[in-house]
Amino acid sequence: MNRNQNHFRALLMLSFSLFVFGCSLSALAQRGAKEFPVNLLFSKDDVPRILENTQRPLFQEYWGSLLKADFEKDQNYLREAFIYALTGDKKRGQNARRAMLEMLKRKRWDYFLEDNKHTLGFLRAGRNTAWMSLGYDWCYDLFSPAEREQILSQIAEKGCVPLYRALYGFRYPETVKHWGFDPEADIPYEVPDMSRWPIILGHNNFRAVISGGFALGMFTIWDRDERVEEWYEMLLDSYDWFVDLLMPDGSYDEGVAYCNYAMTYLIYMMEAFERKNDINLFDGANFIGMMEYSLAMYMPHLLSPRSSVNFGDADKSLNSAVGFWVARHSRDGLSQYIAENYHQDHDIFSLVYYDPTVKPVPPVEKKLFKKLDLDWIITRTGFDIDDLVVAMRSGPPMNHEHADRNSILLKAYREVLLADPLRPTYDPNSPGWLLRTGLGHNTVLIDGKSHQYHLGEEGTNASDAWAKIVRYGRRPGYDFWASDATQAYQLVNDDVKTVTRTALVFHEIPAVIVLDKIEKYETASRFTARWQVENRDQAGKAIVSDDNFTIFRPNARFYAVYAGAPGITLKTDFLPLPEEIGTYPFVDAVTETDGIEFFSIMVGTPLRNQETEPEIVINNEANVWNIDLSKNGTKFELRILDLGALPEFELINNEFIEE
């Protein structure tokens, strides 16, 4: 259903549903509190089914953790209200009631202002409005009539109005009169320039969080506010804008963690529209594809067993609630399997959305090779913590990104062996901002500089740097791809002619071969390829010896041999950061002389601790390079021709695969 059809059908429903909803509240008053007043995301009739889910082996541990949680420590009143709704535990309900009454005392539900006086509803207001609306629905009978009235009034004025103001600014950025922080709020960092925030925030996860909280708030006050018709149309428009941010294959550019954040709230909106107005928005985007995207990005390791490939600021994978919701609506067995087996971080709505009648179906292909519409590439040997995962970040700029075009990550044998920094600071004035730049990633440097990135003037927004996958495929025994990041480097140095990186991944060995090619027009430069060590637990290190280096982790290591033209020197060092930020070792492969052309070959292999390093020999004659690798008597030979911006390659012999 397209945008106009969605709006037409929805607006037809609006006048009728306003009448029906008012009647339902009158009926509720006659029946007492036997039912929830709004039935936002589930009704009393759903409670037995949800309670049954709490006793399933899949959820028993999680449900137990909810019951054991200390409200005085975390003040999570949504959890308390949820438990009360399911069990009738008055202590839990009173915890929620007490916290909600405290919320009423707050001057604002968010810390952003327009024109230095009008509250803007962003992430904080989206959450607060959602929680207050759900708390009202689930704990209705615990509030006095006066308290109910006050809650509804504040949901409207502190929740819906600021959230509508934000969406209006997204739609009409030319009308915005200065967005900024509330001077009374304690904000740990500055954003010097918010002038483009109506455009920037309208194209990221903010929109989904705002829309989800706003939708729950709107339906909670549905029969008592004449503004709901205007809000209703704005919400449907916002939904259409957000789902357009999802690529046709379901991938999302801010990464899986931010996709999870966005989807949690977008599902609130979609569920509310379907439950209250019979408007089914599920087919507005490829949500089944989104689950396949999350599977492709899945990268569990010891330091983060629920991790995904952490391009940019993202790290964690989806919560199971998202997968169960997709499976429930589509009857898609793969989504069910992913949520049951790979996305085992539950939230309370995992219990609500889980449908045990959907049969889980495991992935057909373990050696998954995926090029996302984002121009991100991931290949793997499987989905277990020991399996190999190799990923490259190509593609366009995105919110929450780093300077990481053509950066490669590698995980194997439970360890991240080629690392990307995990969620560096958002504060551009902190020394830790360095971790967001190319100096903190597995990229190439020209005269010590990476490609274009910003200085945080507008926050953690997108830069102007692009890369693109120019070839990719699967041949017998290996996957390959090549990415062109020339434009990204030309923004810093207009003498740059080409910057490409080609990767070949051999699953059976396993091994990765990385070919870097840089050309300049006139001015000679010093070229570097940098490789980062995972060391957040202070257990990583690197050593170099002649033409090879080894990155060590407690359970595995990465051994690599380098060759190139001009000649290459290997060295180790640490990023120049204060000790309190962390210790970040890396390996640099640096040209021995300056030149206008650089070609390098890295042949690397992940190894278990007890494994012997393979014999790797790289020879060349003019522009033809031969790689010979021998491991436990099994041999492999590859020929590479350095004849242009992209090297060509052919497999001469590979005894690691059967004919």
Image: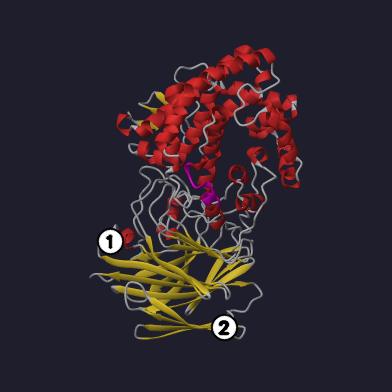
Q: Quadrant of residue 541?
A: bottom right
User: Looking at the image, which residue is at 42% across and 70% down?
Assistant: 502
Q: Is 129 placed left or right of 78 in the picture?
A: left
Q: Is 286 in the magenta? A: yes
Q: Does residue 167 appear to the left or right of 585 in the view shown?
A: left
**Label 2 amino acid?**
Glu
**Secondary structure character of the magenta stretch overall:** helix
Mark 1 secondary-structure assignment: loop
Horizontal and vertical percent for residue 222? Answer: 52, 21
Sort mark 1 into few (<14), some (14-19) or many (20+) by Cα contacts within 10 Å: some
| Spatial CA span between label 1 and label 2 | 44 Å
Tag 1: amino acid: Asn
Location of residue 82 by image quarter = top right
Residue on which the image places disc 2: 655
In the image, is residue 133 part of the stretch drawn in magenta?
no
Of the 4 image quadrants, the one containing the N terminus is top left
Rendered position, 338 above or below 522: above
**What label does residue 493 carry, if any?**
1
Badge 2 crowding class, 10 Å Cα cut-off, few under 14, some 14 to 19, many 20 or more, is some
Quarter in which the C terminus is drawn: bottom right
Per the image, label 2 sits on a secondary structure element best described as loop
The residue at 35%/44% (across/down) is 457
Tell me the magenta residue range.
284-291
Looking at the image, which residue sits at the far left? Answer: 522
**Which is more toward the observer, 260 or 606?**
260
